Amino acid sequence: MVGSWDAGLEELFFRFSHRFTRVEPRRRAWAYVRGLLAPLERRNGWTLAEQAGHVSPDGLQGMLCSAAWDRDAVRDDVRDYVVEQIGDAAGVLVADETGFVKKGT
């Protein structure tokens, strides 16, 4: 369960939380990250919003699209964290987004 990850996740989130100019997007980002790590069957705007206790995905989607945070700096902070935790000078990180097959076009 996500609860067992809270201490490490908080440590990681603290590293880039200052990249959000206001507290509202910071809280939404925290909820979004926790939702991504939650044991959900599907991860989409609605399920992540429900996991966070929101009535609709509007707040989370607004946070993702707003200029209230520095995406490049957050990416760099997360990359630095990953390198510190599992980095190896000769290593390569490969991300495989495996999920359900989408139907339709």
Image (cartoon, helix red, strand yellow):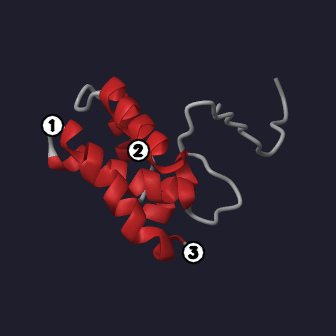
Residue furthest left in the image: 22
**Residue under the point 22% across and 31% down:** 68
Circle number at residue 97: none
**Whole-percent x and y of residue 4?**
49, 76
Residue 72 in sight: yes
How far is disc 2 from disc 1 in space, using C-alphas?
Answer: 21 Å
Looking at the picture, tell me which residue is in the foreground, 24 or 73.
Answer: 73
Looking at the picture, tell me which residue is in the foreground, 46 or 21.
Answer: 21
**Residue under the point 41% across and 70% down:** 6
- Which of the image's four quarters has the C terminus? top right
Looking at the picture, tell me which residue is in the foreground, 66 or 29.
Answer: 29
Looking at the picture, tell me which residue is in the foreground, 80 or 13.
Answer: 80
**Residue under the point 76% across and 45% down:** 99
Label 3 crowd bin: few (<14), some (14–19), many (20+), radius 10 Å: few
How far is disc 1 from disc 3 in space, using C-alphas?
Answer: 30 Å
* Label 2 residue SS: helix
* Label 3 residue SS: loop
Q: Report the amino acid beneath label 2.
A: Tyr
Report which residue position mark 1 lands on: 21
Report which residue position mark 2 lands on: 81
Q: Are marks 2 and 1 in contact (CB under 8 Å)?
A: no
Q: Earlier in the sequence, mark 2 or mark 1?
A: 1
Quadrant location of residue 20?
top left
* Label 1 residue SS: loop
**Whole-percent x and y of residue 79?**
44, 35
Q: Which numbered mark, 2 or 1, is in the foreground of this view?
A: 2
Q: Which numbered mark, 2 or 3, is in the foreground of this view?
A: 2
Report which residue position mark 3 lands on: 1
**Whole-percent x and y of residue 63?**
33, 38
Quadrant location of residue 94?
top right
Q: Report the amino acid beneath label 3.
A: Met
